[in-house]
Image (spheres, rainbow, N blue to C red):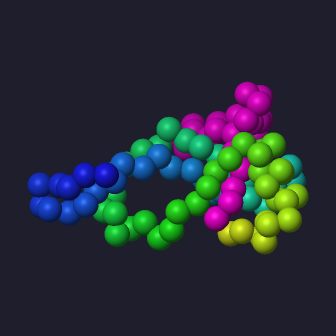
């Protein structure tokens, strides 16, 4: 985060995509809270941030959701893999390419 020349607070973000936002769309194996990381970055005014969320590995996600304190948190996601929005290429978190 930094202050721009125009005195606005700016943040550089790296985008994550919901499965349904990818060119392949949501697959049966994509769970409810799956996200794909991407190389897509840009700079935004901090006022565009609506809320924070937590993205963890699938195994950690499963541990958290099995716990007694878990209450269907809307801010908890797991990393399903990587998505390249320019090519539409998807790769699972284990490094296996997903074919269209």
| Residue in the picture at 81% in, 43% down | 59
Quadrant location of the C terminus in the rendered image: top right
Q: Would residue 45 appear left or right of 93 to someone viewing this image?
A: left
Q: Is residue 92 left or right of residue 5?
A: right
Residue 95 sits in which quadrant? top right
Residue shown at the point (11%, 55%) measured from the top left: 5
Tally the numbered discs.
0
Residue in the picture at 43% in, 66% down: 49
Residue 95 highlighted magenta (yes or no): yes
User: In which quarter of the view is residue 79 placed?
Assistant: top right
41, 24: nearer the viewer: 41
Q: Is residue 32 visible?
A: yes
What span is colored magenta in the figure?
A: 75-100
Q: Could you say where residue 2 lies in the image, as x and y percent from the top left?
A: 25, 52
* Farthest-out residue, left: 5
**Residue 83 location in percent, x, y?**
62, 41
Name of the residue lying farthest toward the top = 95
| Residue located 72% across and 43% down the image | 57
In the image, 52 versus 68, the foreground residue is: 68
Vertical position of residue 21 compared to residue 49: above or below:
above
Residue 88 located left or right of residue 61: left
Q: Is residue 27 visible?
A: no
């Amino acid at each position: 985060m930094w202050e721009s020349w125009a005195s606005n607070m700016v943040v550089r973000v790296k985008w994550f995509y919901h499965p349904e936002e990818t060119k392949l769309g949501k697959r049966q194996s994509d769970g409810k809270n799956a996200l794909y990381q991407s190389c897509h970055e840009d700079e935004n005014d901090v006022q565009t941030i609506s809320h924070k969320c937590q993205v963890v590995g699938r195994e950690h996600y499963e541990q958290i959701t099995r716990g007694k304190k878990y209450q269907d948190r809307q801010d908890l996601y797991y990393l399903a893999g990587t998505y390249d929005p320019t090519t539409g290429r998807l790769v699972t978190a284990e490094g296996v390419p997903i074919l269209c």
